[in-house]
Each structure stands twice: as C-alpha cells, then as structure tokens.
Image (cartoon, rainbow, N blue to C red):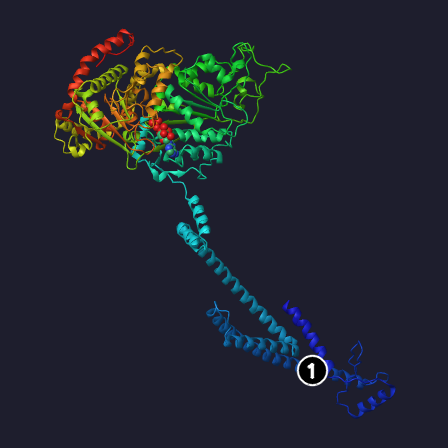
C-alpha cells in the first residue's frame, strides 16, 4: 500500500513540476523558420520546449523536423539525453533534500505533539473528577490543533513528504492503538478482577450492604418494605452433615449399618432453626398458610424446616426413572414430627385431579390414628382431599364401603384393574390394613405416593401378620400377570368396556406389566417407584436388619439432636429442652404415698402417671380414688401444701455428685459401670446386635399390651364400663378433691376418647395409664409425667417423659425408683449419657406423715373395692397379678 501510493505521487510530482516550468506557444510556419535560424546561431543552447495546454502534454523540440540534417539529429539527441539526465539528478537531489527536511519537521512536530499530549493527559488525569479544563490544558490542546493544521498545509505543498509523514503517523497511530488496546485490555482485566473482588466482598457483606442501602431510603415505608424483603431473604439454616471418623465408619460397616444411616444430616433443636411458614422454601399455598395461622402455627419447627423442603422439592417427580428418595427422621418427642409430613402431603396432593389412595400413614395404635386424622383434617380445609382411618373401630364392611365404595367392595362385582378409592389419605394400624389388602376388592396401593411409617421403630418390632411384607408387596408391581392363572385364563372377573376389553385406564403406569403382556422393546425403560417412604420416630432404630427390611431407595437420614452428642445411644435418646427430670428412690410399699405427696404437697396437676401394667394402673386408680373419698368426707388430718418445695426444704434435690444418702452405694457401683460404658467395646455392643435385641425385648414387652390395638376389629365390650362411668362422672366430693381417672386398652373406644377429651379440658387432674399412650399421644396440657413403675428400657423412658414439655413448652417428670431397681435405673440412664439431667429428690418420712392416716384407711378399703370389681367380672383371666 505504502509503495503504491509513493509511486503514484512521484509521477504526479514530476508532471506538476514540468507543467509549472513551461510556457505556452503556438506552432506556426514562421515560428518554425525562426527556430531553425536560432538553432544555427546558438548551437549549444538548449531549445525551448513547447507544450500544448490541452488535454495532451507534449514535450517538443523547437527544431523543425521537415529538413533534418544529420548534425541536427545528433545535436538534438545529445541535448535530449543531457537535459534528461540533468533534470533527473537535480530532481532527485531536491527530492531527497525535501524529504529529509519534511521528515525532520515531522519528527519535531510529532515530538512536540507527543510531549504536549502527555502533558495535558497528565493534567486531565489529575483533574479527572473535575468538569473544569484548566488553562494550560486548553493551551496544549490549542497548540496541538495548530500543529495539525500546519501539517496539513505542508501536505498540500509536498504530497510525497506528506505521504511519508502520513505513513509515519499511520504507523504511530497503529502503535498508539496497540498500546491503547493493551492498556484497555489491562484495564478491562483489572476492572474484571476488581469487579469479582467487589462481588466477593459484597457477598460477604451482603446483609450489611443491604441494610446500608435500606438506611438510605428517605421514606420510612420504603425502608420497612425493603427490610421485609431482606427478612424474606434470610436463607434456610444450612444443616451440617455429621462427619464420621474412619474408626466410626469402620465400626458402622462392621455392624452392617449403611453409610447413610451412620451419616445423618444433623439439626439443632430449638428456636434458632424455626422458620416462618410463609418462607418460600416451604412452597406453601396461601390456603395452607391461612390454615396454619388459624391453627396458631406461625413458624415451622426445626424438624419441619429440615424435612418439608426435601419433600416439596420432589413434589413433581420430574424423572420417572429416579425414585423420589426415602427419608428417615429422628427427632425428640413433641418436636413436631407429625406436621413435618402432614403439611407437605396435603400441599402436594391438593393438586390432584382424581381421587386415588395416594398417602398411607401407618401407626401402632388406634388412638394415634385418630389423633393424626384430626391433624390432617385441621389443615385439609379448602381442598377436595378426603381423609379416612381404618382401625377396626367400625365393622369391616363399613370400612370397606368408606374406602372403595359399596358397589366396588362387593365381592361379586367385577374388578377394576387400577383399583378404586374414595379416599386420598388413609391412616391405619397395620393389622387392619393387611385385612383390606387381602380382602377388600378394588383396594389397591398402586397409586401410592407417600408411605408414612410413624413411630417406625415400634412398628418395625411388630411382625404381626407380616404387615411390612404385605405392604411392600402391594406397592411393588408384580412380575406375574395378576389376574391370569397358569393356563392363561382369567382368575378374577374384570370390569370390561362395551367392546369387551378390560378397563385399564386407572392402572398406574408401573403396574401395567402386572396385568398385560406388554410389547417387548430393545430399549429398556425402567420406571422407579413413585412412592416415597417416610419413617419417623423419637427413637429410630439403627438395627441394620430392620432398616433393610424396609427396602428403602436412595434414603436420607435427618436427625434432630443437640450438638456435641455422639455415640449411638446418645444420638437415639434426645429429650425435649424444656423437660426437668427427677427421681425419687423409695420402698415399693411407699410408692402410692409418694404419688399422694406429689399431688397434695407439690400440687402436681395435669399429670400422666405410667404404670407397668393395666392391673397396676387399675389398682392405683382405685386406691387414690378411695383416698380422696376418705379425705374429703372423713375428718382426717388435712395434708399440708408445700407452696415452694425448695424453700420449705421439704424436698432435697440432690444432684448425683455430692449425694450422700442411701443411694450412695449404688452410686459408687454405677461409677464403675460408667467407666465400663465408656469403653468402645461396650458402645459397639450397644448399637449393634446387643442394642437391637434390647430394643426387641422392649418392644415385645410393649406388644403384649397393645396387640389388641394393632389387630383391630375385635369388638371389645368392656367389662369395667361401670368403673369408667364412675371415673368420668365422678363429682368431686369436695372442691379441692383430686380428680383421677384410668386409661387402658381394656376400655371401649368411646370411653377412651371421652377420657382423653376430659383430660385435655383440664377436668382430670391425674390420668393413670398403661403404656398405651406413652408413644406419640399429644395431650396438650400435660405438665407432669410420673413414672410410677420406672421403665426397664431407655426407649420407653424417653417416650413416657416425652408426653410433657412438648412443642417448646416446659414440663417435669418424676420417676419413682424402687430400692432394688435403683442400680439398673442409673445404669440405663448413664449409658444413654443422660444421668446429668436427672435430679434426685429425697422425701423424708416426716414429710408424708400427714398423708399416712388417710392412706392406711384407703389401703384397708381397697381389698373390698377390688373384690367387688372382680366379682362384677371386671378382670379378665389374662390379667397379670397385682404387685
Ligand atoms: N410449627 C409448629 N408451631 C406450633 N406448634 C406446633 C408446630 N408443630 C407442631 N406443633 C405442636 O407440637 C405438638 C407436638 O407435635 P407432634 O405431636 O407432631 O410431636 P412429635 O414429634 O410427633 O412427638 P412424638 O414423638 O411424641 O410423637 C403438637 O401439639 C403440635 O400441634
């Protein structure tokens, strides 16, 4: 480019220069003659050239051509060549000189320009933030503009030099531009880096920055709105996942405990993990939020904050090849586990179009089923969802009609392969459920989306009717064609459409292969089960065999427990923060007196008193009832009410350290067992087979009492209805009489419900019960729990004392420990790392002296009372002997 330009300009210059040095004449004959003459006279003089001014330029010789001589020709030739050479040399020289001059000037100009530019750039940089341009900068700019004009003028005079200068300038511009680009790139890089640094800083300081931003708002309303927005931005707590050491991992592995179970997501109990119900992470609809508010629920508790988002995230089941993932949840008693599954199930199922059985909640007792149904009904308002229980309270046929409708439950009516349901959520005990799976036509679990096993460890210890096997069988598609016999003939009568084809539109996609021979395809399209198994317990089992029997898929384990707890036992046994625990060590014969002491001296009311058997409960109930009767009718010494036990020194609460009473002996023995329990080998045993076997024993013990509840359907005509009437209709003889009632599985359903209602209304001061209500029951006003017979297993202890101090409230538990049981009790509690939490109460004989006369009388009368009730056939032959 540069060379071509130069060449053109050179030609132009030559042309211009020749044109400027010529004169214009007209060639005529006279002129020709004159020219010839002139040539002869001035032989060596160069002839003037002649040029036309028209479009053509001709360099002419003035010698006429017509009569050219040889000399003239030579002369002409010489002259021409000499002139050309001279012209070329002089032109070349002048051109070089001119080039050098222009280049010098250009270099100087550029230098000046550069210096000026740098000066004012520097100045402009200094004044970057100012709008003013100072005088020196303006002058520099002016000088630069003048220099540019000068250069332009020069360019007009000498285009070649201009070309050189232009080329130089071009080069310089290029250099500048490169430098500028490099600078810009550097600046951009720096800007990016700064931006990234700033973003990181902002991220760290976000709350502070946002608050700062909020403070800048002029109007208070705007600031409030922004603060509200900020509050909504508070992230959900991030729950730590328990880090397991290599040793723990190895140990868990050797016990067969799967990784996910040994590696729970841990949540601290307490208010710090509560979140408002409208938090977006929960994804609750306006309707549900409204129902929650109506029920007095403003925040989700820690276990709900951890569990609900997990369930809500899987609400749409995007990938049919992937199971939604099962969930095992362990959280203390009264921490709100029920709502952790009730709320998301309602929210997710409320979107359904057709009624199908989509949620199944399995619970160990009828009373719990009723309680959970009431919870569902509180929050289901405003949806079409239908909730039902199946507990054996009603006749089997009645339940069948509720579940699938009368026409579908008729054994003679044809089957719909996809089943039929009139309910969306079924809350049931395992025994009755198995009956329906086996015997109710069109009852199916094909469409199940949620299988909740509440009080899971309790249920897993029940092998009754092999309930788990039947449920798992019913939720998995069967590889055999279900309604075809070995010969291919139909084994059941199937409902058909008008063309004679089986009606299959209601079959769950995963179950189609259970009924039809589907075309085989090269491309496997395995479908995962859409049912999500959710296990809840305050004392979740870690027995690998039991967990394996659930056939969990992609499970997660969420545990609510205080930080710093480690060791398997301690993880399992977390008590509510608001619970105060005491133990009273006494003789067996003194135990009823201790209950009277708690009632009359310590003003214990709204209390649940747990005994080890139905008989024990009945006997204590009768005794206290009799005592109250005697006290309020006979002039016996009035008991002294201790207003402030601590001040009156009527109760000496002694912590384990420093206790020097009769239990010191056992204390020292326990001290040795403490150190034993601290050993690794013992821990291992505890959480492996040893532990699970103790769980089994404990639950078998519970099973004995609750079997009738689980089996269901057994019409229980209570023989002690008279007794119950006496209890529930008892009119206190005096206004300060203690109202006592008993509660056991011997009572008919209606009586049990009316007693629970009366207790909830505060009409019963002391409810004496078996372990039937030690699990899961949420009796709102329980302020005290009395372990009349101290539990043999820690699990039972945890569930019993967990009837109080629920939902963040406070409560107190007293355990009456017989002398001979003290050592075992302490061992059990210590092993669970719980001993520090239990206070020792010493009750001196002097303190109960005022109660003794009435108690003695009641005891004497008890025999007759019991004999009367026995004659009335109140006791069944299966009853255990009295203590
Ligand atoms: N978010 C909440 N706000 C206020 N109260 C709540 C909340 N969640 C649950 N509760 C109340 O807390 C009490 C205990 O709840 P729930 O019965 O679900 O406890 P749980 O963990 O199942 O106990 P358990 O192990 O004994 O069965 C109930 O009375 C319930 O209504």
Is residue 329 among what the camera can see? no
Give left or right: position of 877 versus 378. Answer: left
Residue 658 against residue 475 in the figure, above or below: below
Query: Which of the two residues, 146 or 735, is positioned nearer the viewer here?
Result: 735
Is residue 595 among what the camera can see? yes
Neighbor class of circle 1 (other Cα within 10 Å; few <14, some 14-19, many 20+) is few
Task: Determine which quarter of the picture holds residue 217.
Answer: bottom left
Image location (x, y in percent) of residue 603: 23, 28
Mark 1 CB lies closer than 8 A to ligand 1 = no
Give left or right: position of 246 versus 842. Answer: right
Image location (x, y in percent) of residue 765: 28, 24
Task: Determine which quarter of the picture holds residue 512.
Answer: top right
What residue is shown at x 50% (from left), y 30% (from top)? 382
How many marks on residues? 1
Residue 281 against residue 205 in the figure, above or below: above
Quadrant of the drawing holding the N terminus: bottom right
Query: Which of the two residues, 772 or 175, is positioned nearer the viewer here?
Result: 772
Quadrant of the drawing holding the C terminus: top left
Residue 758 against residue 104 in the figure, above or below: above
Whereabouts is ligand 1, in terms of quadrant? top left
Residue 8 against residue 508 in the figure, above or below: below
Give left or right: position of 277 versus 851. Answer: right
Image location (x, y in percent) of residue 436: 46, 15
Q: Which residue is mark 1?
A: 87
């Amino acid at each position: 480019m540069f060379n071509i330009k130069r060449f053109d300009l050179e030609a132009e210059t030559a042309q211009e220069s020749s044109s400027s040095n010529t004169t214009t004449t007209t060639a005529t004959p006279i002129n020709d003659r004159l020219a010839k003459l002139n040539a002869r006279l001035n032989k060596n003089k160069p002839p003037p050239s002649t040029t036309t001014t028209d479009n053509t330029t001709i360099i002419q010789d003035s010698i006429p051509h017509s009569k050219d001589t040889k000399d003239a020709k030579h002369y002409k030739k010489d002259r021409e060549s000499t002139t050309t050479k001279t012209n070329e040399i002089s032109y070349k020289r002048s051109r070089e000189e001119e080039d050098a001059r222009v280049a010098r000037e250009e270099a100087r100009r550029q230098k000046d320009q550069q210096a000026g530019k740098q000066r004012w750039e520097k100045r402009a940089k200094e004044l970057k933030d100012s709008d003013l341009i100072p005088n020196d900068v303006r002058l520099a700019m002016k000088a630069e503009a003048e220099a540019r004009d000068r250069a332009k003028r020069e360019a007009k005079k000498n285009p070649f030099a201009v070309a050189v200068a232009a080329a130089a300038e071009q080069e310089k511009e290029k250099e500048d531009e490169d430098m500028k680009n490099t600078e810009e790139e550097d600046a951009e890089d720096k800007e990016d880096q700064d931006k990234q640094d700033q973003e990181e800083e902002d991220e760290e300081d976000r709350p502070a920055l946002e608050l700062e931003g909020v403070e800048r708002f002029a109007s208070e309303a705007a600031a409030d709105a922004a603060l509200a927005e900020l509050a909504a931005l508070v992230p959900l707590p991030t729950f730590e996942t328990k880090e397991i050491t290599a040793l723990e991992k190895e140990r868990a592995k050797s016990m067969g405990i799967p990784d996910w179970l040994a590696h729970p997501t841990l949540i601290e109990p307490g208010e710090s993990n509560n979140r408002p119900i409208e938090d977006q992470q929960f994804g609750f609809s306006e309707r549900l939020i409204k129902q929650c508010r109506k029920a007095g629920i403003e925040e989700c508790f820690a276990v709900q904050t951890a569990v609900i988002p997990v369930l809500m995230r899987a609400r749409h089941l995007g990938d049919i090849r992937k199971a939604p993932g099962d969930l095992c949840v362990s959280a203390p008693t009264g921490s709100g586990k029920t709502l952790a599954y009730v709320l998301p199930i309602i929210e997710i199922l409320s979107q359904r179009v057709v009624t199908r059985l989509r949620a199944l909640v399995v619970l160990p007792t009828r009373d719990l089923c009723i309680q959970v149904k009431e919870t569902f009904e509180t929050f289901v308002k405003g949806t079409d969802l239908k909730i039902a229980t199946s507990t054996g309270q009603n006749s089997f046929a009645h339940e069948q009609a509720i579940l699938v409708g009368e026409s579908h439950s008729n054994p003679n009516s044809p089957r719909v392969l996809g089943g039929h349901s009139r309910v969306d959520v079924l809350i049931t005990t395992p025994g009755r459920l198995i009956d329906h799976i086996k015997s109710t036509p069109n009852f199916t679990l094909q469409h199940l989306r949620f299988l909740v096993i509440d009080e899971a460890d309790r249920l897993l210890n029940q092998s009754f009717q092999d309930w788990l096997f039947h449920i798992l069988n019913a939720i998995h598609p069967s590889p055999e064609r279900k309604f075809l016999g070995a010969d291919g003939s139909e084994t059941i009568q199937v409902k058909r459409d008008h063309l004679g084809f089986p009606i299959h539109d209601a079959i769950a996609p995963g179950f189609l292969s259970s009924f039809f021979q589907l075309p085989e395809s090269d491309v496997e399209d395995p479908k995962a089960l859409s049912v999500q198994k959710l296990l809840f317990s305050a004392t979740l089992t870690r027995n690998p065999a039991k967990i394996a029997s659930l056939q969990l898929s992609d499970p997660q384990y969420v545990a609510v427990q205080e930080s710093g707890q480690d060791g398997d036992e301690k993880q399992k046994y977390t008590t509510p923060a608001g619970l105060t625990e005491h133990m009273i060590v006494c003789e067996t014969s003194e135990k009823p007196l201790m209950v009277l002491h708690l009632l009359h001296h310590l003003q214990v009311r709204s209390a649940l008193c747990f005994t080890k058997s139905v008989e024990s409960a009945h006997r204590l109930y009768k005794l206290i009832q009799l005592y109250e009767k005697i006290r309020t009718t006979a002039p016996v010494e009035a008991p002294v009410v201790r207003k402030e036990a601590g001040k009156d020194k009527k109760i000496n609460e002694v912590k384990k350290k420093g206790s020097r009473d009769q239990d010191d002996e056992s204390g020292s023995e326990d001290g040795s067992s403490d150190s034993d329990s601290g050993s690794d080998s013992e821990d291992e045993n505890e959480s492996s087979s040893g532990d699970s076997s103790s769980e089994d024993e404990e639950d078998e013990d519970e099973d004995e009492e609750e079997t009738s509840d689980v089996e269901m359907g057994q019409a229980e005509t209570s023989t002690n209805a008279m007794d119950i009437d006496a209890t529930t209709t008892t009119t206190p003889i005096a206004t300060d009489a203690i109202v006592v009632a008993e509660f056991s599985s011997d009572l008919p359903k209606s009586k049990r419900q009316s007693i629970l209602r009366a207790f909830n209304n505060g009409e019963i001061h002391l409810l004496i019960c078996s372990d039937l209500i030690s699990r899961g029951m949420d009796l709102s006003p329980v302020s005290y729990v009395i372990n009349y017979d101290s539990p043999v297993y820690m699990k039972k202890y945890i569930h019993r004392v967990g009837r109080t101090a629920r939902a963040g409230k406070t409560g107190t538990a007293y355990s009456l420990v017989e002398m001979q049981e003290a050592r075992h009790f302490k061992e059990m509690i210590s092993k669970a790392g719980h001993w520090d939490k239990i206070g020792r109460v010493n009750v001196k004989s002097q303190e109960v002296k005022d109660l003794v006369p009435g108690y003695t009388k009641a005891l004497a009368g008890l025999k007759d009372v019991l004999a009367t009730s026995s004659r009335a056939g109140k006791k069944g032959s299966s009853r255990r002997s009295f203590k």
